[in-house]
Amino acid sequence: MEVEELLQKYAAGIRDFTAINLSEANLSGVNLSGANLSQANFSVANLSGANLSGANLSEAKLNVTRMSGANLTKANLTGACINVSNLIRADLTGAQMAQATLIRAELIRAELSGANLTGANFSGADLREGKLRQANLSRANLSGVNLRGTALTAANLGQANLHGSDLSRANLSGANLKDAELRQANLSRANLSGTDMSGANLRWADLSGANLRWADLSEAKLSGANLIGADMSHANLLNASLVHADLTQANLIQADWVGADLTGAILTGAKLHAVSRLGLKTEGMICEWVDLSPDGDRSEIYRFSSEDSKTFFNATLPTVQIIVDAPLEQESNFSLAATYYQIARDYPIMSQPPSIEVGPRKTTITFRIVSDDYLFATAYVAIFPFTDAAETQENIIHLMRQMENPYSESVSMTDNKRLEQIIKELSIAIDKINEIKKSKSYLKIPKRGSLFQSATQVILTNSSDQTLIIYHNPAFGKRFVNQNNSLGLVKETAIITNKFSVPPLRITFDFIKGFHYLDK
């Protein structure tokens, strides 16, 4: 069929042109919207600027075809062969292209947003500055593809093959790259914020300067990856492999990387405020200094030798432990949960619920916190529901005042800026407790059960696994049996001993020095 005949039939209302052969034909600018062109042969044809919106081109042959600027919105190109074709600036919005082959096709600045490209083969194609927002590229072959500056926001690239692809400066925010193959891919300065890359293979990938804020990289393989200057703040790196990865000056503020393998990695200059140092593999890691400032502004630099780094990166999680000399009954359990829930609303540092271990005679309440800086402040707030609160809080304030004493010989042993931070956090906690005391919501919570009136012991554990007892009720754990012979009743009565004394100043300073990063 000749081009003229095709256009005449189309003008007459005919739409079915299945298996038509128009290879090498000049169809530039034609209107064939909504036509059935399935299995048609348009190889080496010129369809530049053509209107093929809504057309059925399933299994069509479009190899080496010119389609620059063509309108293919919502077209059906399922299984079509579009190899080495020119689709520069073509509009393929919402097109159905599952299993299509576009090997070495030119799609520079093409519009593919919302397109279904499941299992499509783009090997060696050029998609520079293209738009693939919310496109479905699951299990697609994008190996060696040029995707520089491409918009892939919220796109589905689950299990896609992007081996050796160039994604530099691409926008992949909110995209799904779960279990994707990204070996040796170039993702430098790419926007990967909020991206799901769990289980992805990123070995030897270039992620320098990339935005990985809030990204999910759990179980990801990042061995040998270049992460220099990458922003990984709040990222999920649980059990990720970072063997021999370069994390020089990477931002890892509040990242979660418990179980990560950092064997042989470079971490010099990384920003590590509020990062857990538990459960890491650090054999052969290179790290000369880290930035522990909350804002990553290098105001808190910690330098260490190789031996220091081993200690630093295998620290324990700081805890505040309240041991109550009574078992936890149902009434107390309800009141305690309600009380801490209400407190956490006003004091976010305690937003993570405590773990509670209940024994036949004692209840242990443990708060795990992200930084040593909050130990004294958290203890001040955590003890609030108990009768022992006033004495415990008085001890904490007394300890802080002792350390502020400018005439103390021990002052020179600690860092003034860190001490100021601890006192600042405590001041915030004191203000919050005063606000909570006036809260109508808190006052409505009943303090049922004997737990709140029982004797307590409050123990702090720092990141060096050193402990400091800041309060111990004299009656804690001390009882004698008083039997009334006439009635045959047995009653336990607490033995009252001397009042608890606060730890000596030297011991408190030694405890704070165990925060690792006091010495700059």
Image: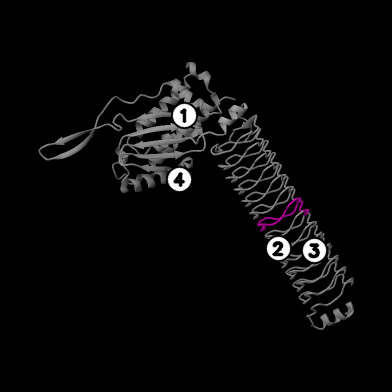
Q: Residues within 10 Å of mark 1 (few under 14, many from 20)?
A: some
Q: Is residue 2 above or below residue 438?
A: below
Provide residue 348's location: percent of width, then percent of height.
Answer: 48, 42
In this view, the residue farthest toward the bottom is 12
Q: Which residues are magenta?
A: 144-166
Q: Residues within 10 Å of mark 4 (few under 14, many from 20)?
A: few
Regarding mark 4 in the picture, which secondary structure is present there? helix
| Tag 2 residue | 119
| Tag 1 residue | 466
Q: In the rendered structure, which amino acid carries the disc numbered 4?
A: Arg
Q: Which tag, 2 or 1, sits closer to the chain's start?
A: 2
Task: Give the alpha-carbon distance from disc 4 to disc 1, as whole Å.
Answer: 30 Å
Q: Which tag, 3 or 4, sits closer to the chain's start?
A: 3
Residue 90 is marked as: 3
Q: Which tag, 4 or 2, sits closer to the chain's start?
A: 2
Task: Give the alpha-carbon distance from disc 1 to disc 3, as whole Å.
Answer: 65 Å
Q: In the rendered structure, which amino acid carries the disc numbered 2?
A: Gly
Q: In the rendered structure, which amino acid carries the disc numbered 3?
A: Ala
Regarding mark 3 in the picture, which secondary structure is present there? loop
| Tag 4 residue | 345
Q: Which tag, 4 or 1, sits closer to the chain's start?
A: 4
Can I make out residue 406 in this image? no
Can I make out residue 500 in this image? yes
